[in-house]
Amino acid sequence: MCDVATPLTYERYTGNWQGSYQGWLITPKTMGMRMAKNLPGLKNFYMAGQWVEVGGGLPAVTISGRDVVQIICKRDKKRFVTMAP
């Protein structure tokens, strides 16, 4: 048995634009761009994931999640600590 995923598969399962498996395209214009992790007027609402970071894949998603945790810790005046597994 062979399992195959195409852009149509990604679009069907995730709803990602044109079956994208990563976030925004890295270009000279978008490189280094940072998106806000919250929306004005929505209290306690934070965004993390491949569409919040330029580039994509698992590393970008985990970094965006870590960024949100740091924002929440700072807001709650709690120390942010990481540990290697």
Image (spheres, rainbow, N blue to C red):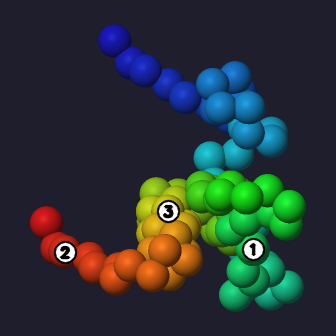
Q: Is residue 67 visible?
A: no
Callout 1: helix, strand or loop?
loop
Which residue type carries mark 3?
Gly
Instruction: State which tag comes first along the sequence, 2 or 1.
Output: 1
Image quarter of the C terminus: bottom left
Side of 48 relative to 37 (left or right): left
Q: Which residue, given by chain and number where applicable, does mark 3 sit on?
A: 65
Residue 51: x, y in percent? Answer: 70, 57
Vertical placement of residue 38 versus 12, above or below = below
Q: Nearer the viewer, residue 63 or 74?
A: 74
Q: Which residue, given by chain and number where applicable, does mark 2 sit on?
A: 83
Side of 13 relative to 15 (left or right): left
Residue 11 circle label: none
Q: Which residue, given by chain and number where applicable, does mark 1 sit on?
A: 35
- Answer whether labels 1 and 3 touch (C-beta < 8 Å): no
Residue 53: x, y in percent? Answer: 66, 68
Instruction: State which tag comes first along the sequence, 3 or 2.
Output: 3
User: Which quarter of the figure has residue 75?
Assistant: bottom right
Residue 23: x, y in percent? Answer: 68, 58
